Image (cartoon, helix red, strand yellow):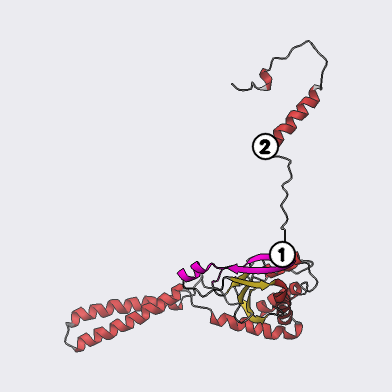
């Protein structure tokens, strides 16, 4: 039981009753119905967010390290972290039942810090801080493994020498020493071989170019609408950690978090993504 294809339809050659619609109209209607069934030519509209949150997905609770969720109360935007008491006890976490942070209490201190950090009179200091931050980066796993191997080989060689002094068979101990020295030599080679996986440090000129480009983006913050502000914060790679006990927020900006050409926001400048580099500051909230 299925429909025959149109080329096998049996159509009367004689018109037995007046036409309701003509053939072209019928074919057009069939085409529209088919496209509708396939979901073609139907605009896919995104449902706009009911409320706009400029820090959406960027604020974390210091007590549990979870993202705080947006919530509107009396027309004002808040971020809340709700941690049921039984979960806190089970995970041995000291956490209030509800933690609230008002959005506009953070906006002014954050924008002020960003504007100050990228102010032309303070660019040199910001560049120096960013360059110094690279010195504290951990060694790559390969480098760490090579250093561990060298330390273990040194300890073995000390034991083998002690065994020789104690009267052990020199031929046996000598083979142990030769193997250990060869292993140590390989580790020394690995230690001094450039690691392609390790992040390359940025030069002073690269940092200067990055800071100047980001400075253009920060200038749009003051008069930007919430959607533009949210985009700027996202491109700056912000991570905001709220400490309710001290009523402070630790702000950290990963200036290469976007990992690609920076988008244009109301005339902002494009720049290529540099190696990871961050700046941070603890902000005191403007109001509670």
Badge 2 density bin: few <14, some 14–19, many ≥20, Cα 10 Å: few
Please indicate, yes or no, whether residue 270 appears anywhere in the rendered image: no
Q: Which residue is drawn at 29% across and 83% down?
A: 157
Badge nearest the viewer, 2 or 1: 2
Whether residue 34 is situated above or below residue 228 in the rendered picture: above
Residue 174 image point, x, y percent: 23, 81
Which residue is denoted by mark 2 in the rendering? Answer: 38
What residue lies at 71% left-to-right and 35% top-to-bottom?
35
> Is 110 or 272 nearer to us in this picture?
110
Is residue 85 on the magenta stretch?
yes
Is residue 143 shown left or right of residue 210?
Answer: left
SS for tag 2?
Answer: loop
As rendered, which of 32 and 194 lies closer to the eye? 32
At which x and y percent is residue 246? 61, 82
Q: How far apart are marks 2 and 1 (CA)?
A: 35 Å
* Quarter occupied by residue 3: top right
Quadrant where the N terminus sits is top right
* Residue 275 falls inside the magenta stretch: no
Sequence-first tag of 2 and 1: 2
User: Which residues, given as a range, are shown in magenta?
Assistant: 64-90
Residue 100 at what x, y percent from top left? Answer: 64, 72
Instruction: Place residue 234 in its image quadrant.
Output: bottom right
- Assign a secondary structure to mark 1: loop
């Amino acid at each position: 039981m299925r429909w025959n294809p149109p080329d096998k339809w049996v159509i009367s050659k004689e018109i037995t009753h007046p036409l309701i619609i003509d053939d072209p109209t019928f074919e057009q209607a069939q085409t529209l119905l088919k496209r509708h069934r396939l979901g073609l030519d139907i605009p896919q509209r995104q449902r706009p967010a009911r409320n706009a949150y400029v820090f959406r997905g960027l604020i974390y609770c210091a007590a549990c390290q979870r993202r705080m969720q947006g919530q509107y109360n009396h027309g004002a935007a808040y971020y809340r972290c709700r941690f049921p008491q039984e979960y806190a006890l089970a995970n041995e976490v000291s956490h209030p039942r509800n933690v609230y942070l008002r959005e506009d209490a953070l906006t002014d201190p954050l924008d002020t810090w960003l504007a100050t950090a990228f102010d032309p009179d303070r660019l040199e200091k910001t560049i120096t801080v960013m360059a110094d931050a690279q010195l504290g980066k951990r060694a790559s796993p390969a480098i760490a493994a090579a250093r561990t191997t060298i330390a273990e080989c040194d300890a073995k060689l000390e034991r083998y020498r002690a065994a020789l002094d104690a009267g052990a068979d020199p031929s046996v101990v000598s083979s142990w020493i030769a193997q250990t020295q060869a292993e140590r030599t390989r580790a020394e080679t690995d230690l001094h071989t450039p690691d392609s996986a390790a992040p390359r440090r940025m030069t002073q000129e690269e940092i200067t170019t990055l800071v100047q480009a980001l400075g253009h983006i920060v200038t749009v913050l003051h008069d930007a609408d919430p959607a533009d502000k949210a985009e700027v914060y996202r491109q700056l790679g912000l991570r905001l950690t709220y400490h309710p006990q001290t009523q402070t927020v630790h702000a950290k900006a990963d200036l290469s978090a976007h990992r690609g050409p920076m988008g244009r926001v109301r005339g902002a400048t494009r720049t290529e993504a540099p190696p990871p580099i961050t700046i941070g500051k603890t902000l005191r909230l403007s109001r509670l």
